[in-house]
Every structure is written in structure tokens, then in C-alpha cells.
């Protein structure tokens, strides 16, 4: 059959189209070629010089030594530096179940398939097989014949080829734009991965801090309640006034309010962790975190400023958006120029099915066409101007993203520096406040200190204790924020960002069995 349908003459177009297309694809494409933006010309993140070593608060969670290591790389699983097996398990669960991460992964796969769609549609000829059988009535007299059957069958089969010559590179720019869109989706996935892991670390730290603050408030409440009972006994013997008793009971009630507030916020934090993991709050079974079980990383990698734009997923996504809009300028430019098309067909036609593939049934055709837009109401010119404006918008958005990235790193560095100093002061204040309160309470029981002094130092200690716990949590959170601000080390990861659990159901098993 093939020797009649695809003879040497008839197969000309199918044979030489790939060579012709390869030659045309090597030509230059209209529109500007994309140029990667230069890294910001700076050698520092902050306005003033940073201390390489941070202040310490020995014996306090989050008070260990920390120092910046300039030029050091970031580990892919940077959260493991906190040395919390419970935190590692939680993040592993989230990477398998978080729906936002799964959605970003699906968006990436869809954009990658769109690249294949553009390559197949833009670079290669469209080849289709047609076949048909027609029974029709047509008077033989229209051919000038006095006799003949007016009713007959017509059979045909053909292979049709259509190819758009990419003379000016519009197709190549379209594929370039599709690839850039896939890059955007890729870095959006990395951004979701970074955001998820950082949020879990900071949420776990917040959960631990709220638990510690609630425990501190419970201890303070217990002491306040005991003192209230002592004050009531003293009222009974006439050594204090009723005002002293009601004032102490007011302090107890206020601490109870604080306790309920911490309890509520702790529930919120645990619910947030459950959702980040991708489970319902009622079913998540989230572990209880403790600041004392978390380890503060001693070595803090500090990337050189010029490498930040290659590490941050949001900056890379903004750069890919630049590339995509740049390619669309080329597409819009190519649309203003002549469009070349080649079509061809190889097949056969006969009045009987048995003769369809006979030696006298072969047919073929080759055609070329050119179209030059002349006037379309200014549509094409407006599209090109719009594409240029979109590119300029992307340039400004890229600049804004870079500035935000450097701001976040600078903020994290200063937060770490001041946070270390704040924790040292807060831990000192807590210790002094506790020692003072102990002394004043003993003096009060002996009658050598006033009740107002006890109230004052109870309140001072409560404030100092809560501030100390908050400062401890801030050290952990600021450390996680620095890793996130520097990009999170995704470039060192070996596996995919989203690692879904293998979910098998009856329908899937049946489908795989049928295949």
C-alpha cells in the first residue's frame, strides 16, 4: 500500500520539511534577547557593621553562642539544626500532606506540559490522516457526456501536512515564554516549600513560648493565691486592712485572665500547626513543644549579597517573569511581519475501494502561502506596545522584589543582634525580679515590709518572666527567619519539594491493572 501512497515524488514535502524547519529555526528571532539582571552592587546587607558574634545568656533557652559565617552555604534541611526530632517529623508530614504545596506542585507540572504543547504546536508540522467514502449523484451531462451512471461511490485517503515557517522567530519566542512560565511555577513551588517549612518552625516556637508563658503565669498565680490566703489570715487578726485583701484578690483575678488568654492563643497555635501539616485540628495529634528541648544553631551562614538574587525563590520567580514578558515582546513583533505557511497532501482517490491503493489512484499536492498584515485597526501595534509596557512593569516588580529581599535579610540580621542583647537583659531582669520578690515576701510575712511592696514586686516579676520567655522564643524565630530570608537552601535539596504519600484506591488499582 505504501509504495503507491508515498512514492518518491509524492513524499517530497514529508522528506524535506524537517530539514527546512531546522534551517529556519537557526535564524535570528525578532525582539530583544533576554539579559539576566545584574546583582546589586553592594558588599553588605546592613547600614552599619554587624558583630560576628552575638551576645549570650548562659543557662537560658535560646541564650547559647551564635556567630555569623560569611559565605557559608545553607543546608537543605536547615531546620534540623534545631535538633528537635519532633519538629523534623512534623515538617516531613507537612511536605507530604500540605495542600498548598501540593497545588503549587500541580501548577508546575501543568506549566511544564504547556511547554511541550508549545514546542509541539510551534516547531513541528501538523500531520493528519484523512479518509472517507462518499456516495453521490451527479449528472454525467455536466461533463459533456451523453451517457453514464449518475450515481457512484468515491473513496479517498490522504495524509495532510501543514507547517508554519518560523522565519522571524515568533514561534521560538512563544516557546521561550512558555519555558519562562514554567520557571515561574518552579520557583513559586520553591517559595511555597520555603514558606511552609519556615512557618512550621516559627509556629512550633510560638507554641512552645505560649506553653512556657502559660506555665509561668500558673506559677505566679499559685504564689499570688497563697499570698491572698495569708493576707486573709492577717486580716482576721487585724494586721492588714480589707483593701489589702481585695487588692491581692484583684491581682489573682487578673492573672487568671492572662492564663485564659495564653490558653486560647496556645490552642490557636496548635490549630495552625495542624493546618500547616495538612490535617484537621481534631485529628492532627500535634506534639507539644518545649523551648528547653530546642537547640539554637551556633553557626549562622551569611551568604554574600551578590548571591542572594540567585537563592531567593521570589527573586528567581520575578526574573522568570521578566523573561516571559520579554519573549512576548518578540511574539508581538513577529506578528507584524509576514507569515509563511506550507501545506502538502499525499493520498489516493478511486471509485471503488479495491482500486483506492492502485497505481492510478495516487494524488499529491504542495502549496505555499504568505500573509502580510497591512491594516487591522492598529490592533497589532497596540499589542506590541502593551507587551513592552508589561515588560517594563515586570522590570519594576523585579526591582521591588530584590529590594524587599535585601530588606528582609537586613531586618533578620538586626533582629538577631538586638534579640541576643534583649534576651541577656531580660534573663537578668527575671533573675533580679525573682530574688527581689522572694526577699520582699519573706519580709512581709515577718511584718517588716508593706503589702504594697509585695504587690509591686509580684507584678514586676510577672512582667519580667513573660518578657524573658518572649525573648527566648524570639531568638529561635529570628534564627529561622534568617534562614528563610537567605533562601532556605532549596538548591541543595536532592528530592522534590512536594513528596506526597502513595495513595492507592480501588479505582486506581483497577485502572493500572487494565493498562
Image (tube, rainbow, N blue to C red):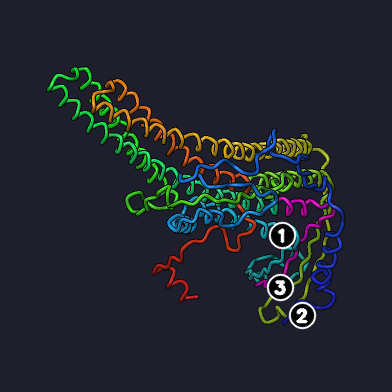
Q: Which mark is residue 148?
A: 3
Q: Position of residue 162 (x, y in %)?
A: 75, 61
- The tag earlier along the polypeptide, 3 or 1, is 1
Is residue 73 at least partly visible in the picture? yes
Quadrant occupied by the N terminus: bottom right
Q: Nearer the viewer, residue 273 or 334?
A: 273
Closer to the observer: label 1 or label 2? 1
Q: Which mark is residue 4?
A: 2
For the residue carrying disc 1, how many other residues have a C-alpha within 10 Å: few (<14), some (14-19), or many (20+)? some
User: Mark 1 sits on what residue?
Assistant: 119
Magenta residues (range): 153-177
Q: In the displayed image of the protein, which residue is found farthest to the left? A: 236
Q: Nearer the viewer, residue 197 or 359?
A: 197
**In the rendered structure, does residue 157 fall within the stretch colored magenta?**
yes
Compared to residue 203, the image places residue 223 above or below, namely above
Looking at the image, which residue is at 75% across and 65% down? 161
Q: Gap in Å between the C-alphas at discs 1 and 2?
A: 32 Å
Amino acid at each position: 500500500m505504501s509504495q503507491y501512497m508515498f512514492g518518491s515524488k509524492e513524499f517530497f514535502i514529508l522528506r524535506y520539511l524537517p530539514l527546512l524547519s531546522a534551517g529556519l529555526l537557526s535564524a535570528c528571532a525578532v525582539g530583544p534577547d533576554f539579559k539576566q539582571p545584574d546583582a546589586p552592587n553592594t558588599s553588605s546587607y546592613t547600614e552599619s557593621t554587624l558583630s560576628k558574634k552575638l551576645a549570650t545568656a548562659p543557662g537560658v533557652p535560646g541564650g547559647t553562642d551564635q556567630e555569623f559565617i560569611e559565605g557559608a552555604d545553607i543546608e537543605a534541611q536547615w531546620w534540623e539544626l534545631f535538633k528537635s526530632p519532633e519538629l523534623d517529623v512534623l515538617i516531613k508530614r507537612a511536605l507530604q500532606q500540605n495542600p498548598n504545596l501540593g497545588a503549587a506542585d500541580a501548577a508546575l507540572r501543568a506549566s511544564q506540559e504547556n511547554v511541550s504543547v508549545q514546542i509541539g504546536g510551534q516547531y513541528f508540522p501538523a500531520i493528519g490522516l484523512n479518509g472517507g467514502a462518499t456516495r453521490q449523484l451527479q449528472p454525467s451531462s455536466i461533463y459533456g457526456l451523453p451517457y453514464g451512471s449518475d450515481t457512484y461511490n468515491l473513496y479517498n485517503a490522504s495524509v495532510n501536512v501543514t507547517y508554519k515557517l518560523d522565519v522571524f522567530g515568533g514561534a521560538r519566542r512563544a516557546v521561550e515564554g512558555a519555558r519562562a512560565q514554567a520557571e515561574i511555577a518552579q520557583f513559586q513551588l520553591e517559595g511555597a516549600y520555603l514558606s511552609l517549612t519556615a512557618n512550621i518552625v516559627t509556629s512550633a516556637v510560638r507554641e512552645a513560648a505560649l506553653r512556657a508563658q502559660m506555665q509561668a503565669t500558673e506559677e505566679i498565680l499559685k504564689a499570688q493565691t497563697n499570698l491572698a490566703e495569708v493576707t486573709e489570715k492577717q486580716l482576721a487578726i487585724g494586721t492588714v486592712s480589707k483593701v489589702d485583701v481585695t487588692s491581692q484578690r484583684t491581682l489573682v483575678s487578673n492573672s487568671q485572665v492572662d492564663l485564659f488568654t495564653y490558653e486560647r492563643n496556645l490552642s490557636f497555635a496548635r490549630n495552625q500547626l495542624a493546618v500547616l501539616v495538612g490535617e484537621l485540628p481534631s485529628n492532627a495529634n500535634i506534639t507539644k513543644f518545649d523551648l528547653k528541648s530546642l537547640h539554637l544553631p551556633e553557626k549562622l551562614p551569611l551568604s554574600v549579597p551578590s548571591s542572594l538574587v540567585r537563592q531567593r525563590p521570589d527573586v528567581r520567580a520575578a526574573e522568570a517573569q521578566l523573561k516571559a514578558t520579554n519573549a512576548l515582546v518578540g511574539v508581538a513583533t513577529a506578528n507584524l511581519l509576514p507569515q509563511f505557511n506550507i501545506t502538502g497532501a499525499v493520498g489516493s482517490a478511486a471509485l471503488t475501494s479495491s482500486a483506492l491503493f492502485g497505481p492510478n489512484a495516487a494524488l499529491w499536492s504542495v502549496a505555499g502561502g504568505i500573509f502580510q498584515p497591512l491594516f487591522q485597526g492598529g490592533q497589532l501595534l497596540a499589542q506590541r506596545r502593551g507587551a513592552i509596557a508589561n515588560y517594563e512593569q515586570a522590570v519594576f516588580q523585579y526591582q521591588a522584589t530584590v529590594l524587599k529581599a535585601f530588606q528582609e535579610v537586613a531586618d533578620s540580621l538586626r533582629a538577631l543582634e538586638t534579640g541576643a542583647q534583649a534576651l541577656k537583659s531580660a534573663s537578668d531582669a527575671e533573675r533580679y525580679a525573682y530574688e527581689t520578690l522572694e526577699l520582699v515576701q519573706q519580709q512581709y510575712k515577718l511584718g517588716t515590709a508593706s503589702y504594697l511592696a509585695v504587690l509591686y514586686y509580684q507584678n514586676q516579676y510577672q512582667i519580667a518572666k513573660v518578657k524573658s520567655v518572649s525573648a527566648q522564643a524570639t531568638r529561635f524565630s529570628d534564627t529561622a527567619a534568617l534562614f528563610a530570608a537567605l533562601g532556605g537552601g532549596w538548591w541543595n535539596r536532592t528530592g522534590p519539594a512536594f513528596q506526597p504519600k502513595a495513595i492507592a484506591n480501588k479505582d486506581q488499582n483497577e485502572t493500572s491493572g487494565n493498562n
